[in-house]
Amino acid sequence: MKNRTFGLTDQMEKILQNIVTRIRNCYRIMEGMPGLLWIFILPFTNSLVSCEEPFTPDLRQDYSNLLVVEGLISTDPGPYVVRLSRATTVVYPEYNPVTDSEVIIMDNQGHSEMLSETEPGVYTTATDGIQGIAGNSYKIQIKDSERNVYESAFEKLPAPVDIDTIYPILEYHYSDVYHQDIPGYRFNISTQNGDNDSLCFRWQLQHTWQYASDYQIYLYYDGKLHVFPDPDSLQTCWITEPVYSIFTTTAIGLDKPVITDYPLHYIGFDTRHFSIRYSLLVKQLTISRSAWEYWDAVKEQTTASGNLYTHLPYQIKGNIKRVDDENEPVLGYFQVAGIDVKRIFINRPPAIIPMHYPICELSLPDYEAYGWMFYNIDARDWPEYVTIDGSGQRALPDRQCTDCREKGGTIVKPDFWIDN
């Protein structure tokens, strides 16, 4: 069985699959890390698939063990979560949690709460604990197991600005695989009017897409041949992932305190994201100017062209310092934010717009594999899934052509999902 992409040679397919595999491996590493930590290694993973020679920065030994703080208190109800870890080398990145620490969130009204460590390196407020209130100021204090104390300055929690619209626009981007422009969707966002002209924003995105395997399962083999009881049960899946990019902007310098048509992420139609139905969840954080300056610097560091490594992550200062040694770098930022959330759903584009994602096509080896299947006595390969073509011929294609879970999804429909 061969997975065929329109217009691709076998060699081009292998190159494309190799690139995708390397990117996925990078993201698998990141999935086990806090959301902030992957930002610090993302520029280095980019070199895996770029035309530049891989670069190993000459980091001093003490930078490989820096404290990384990821925390947030917002106008959303709690509980709130703070993650503590130690930075590791960019060559062998891993999540190294900081355990047995005392973590306290306090406000300028005299309220405070010590967080509970609910899992290694993860500290959480109580459900009925401290709450973020717009207009109040908040700070974090951390005392690690070696009694080193770190804290941020008080920062005022801004009132949230509501999201107005989120919408896709059709764009054509050049594809190095197809050697032509192919279509895709760029998502834009607009806010409602804010109450001042010094508003700053950051957006966190999570997307979910519904997709299907190319063939149904009609029979399965586990040493004996059986009728598959529900041919539709493994055909439709959903994948939910963060959008691994940083989106920030500010209304400073604008005539009105409103953001209009700010571009978010782009996804081409060479993936299955829009093959059936797509959902985008946007969390809009109204943040302080200092927080915006921090995240904008991180964004610039992770997306800079030319000399990608001019500014290494440990040179970006957050708002947390060691009390008795302000020269010790601390990675991360304790955020206070007003939050608004909006979800949209997008259907498959009209039929006139071509899709370019790879599809499965039955070939002679797939039909032959069905016959050889009965000689396979290795139970580790079971069950084998058999499809039947339009003429009644039985075939044993690659499993990802019949079982949608093989592409990384789940057959469990998300609770929030709304069918078309």
Image (spheres, grey):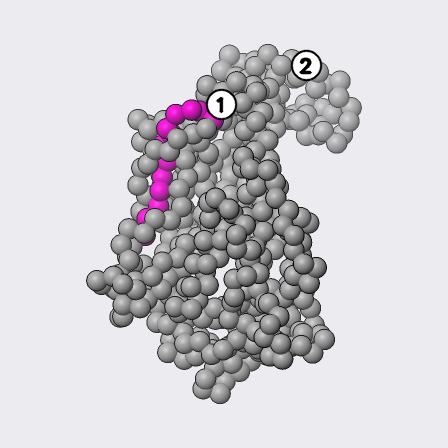
126 horizontally vs 348: left or right: right
Q: Quadrant of the N terminus?
A: top right
Mark 1 crowd level (few <14, some 14–19, many ≥20, 10 Å Cα): some
Mark 2 crowd level (few <14, some 14–19, many ≥20, 10 Å Cα): few
Counting residues from the N terminus, which is met first, the one under dot 1 or under dot 2? Answer: 1
Magenta span: 177-189
Residue 201: name its quadrant: bottom left
Q: Position of residue 371 (x, y in %)?
A: 68, 14
Decide if residue 29 is in sight here.
Answer: yes
Please check the rendered image and state whether residue 186 is part of the magenta-colored stretch, yes or no. Answer: yes
Q: Residue at x 42, y 64 (%)?
A: 293
Q: Where residue 64 is drawn, which disc sits there? A: none
| Above or below 204: residue 241 | above
Q: Amino acid at mark 1?
A: Thr
Q: Which residue is mark 1?
A: 5
| Above or below 244: residue 352 | above
Please check the rendered image and state whether residue 168 is part of the magenta-colored stretch, yes or no. Answer: no
Q: Nearer the viewer, mark 1 or mark 2?
A: 1
Q: Which residue is mark 2?
A: 371
Q: Main secondary structure of the magenta part?
A: strand
| Above or below 37: residue 45 | above
* Residue found farthest to the bottom: 110
Q: Position of residue 213 (x, y in %)?
A: 52, 30
Q: Residue at x 54, y 22 (%)?
A: 12
In space, the residues marked 1 and 2 are separated at their CA atoms by 27 Å
Q: Residue at x 46, y 34 (%)?
A: 272
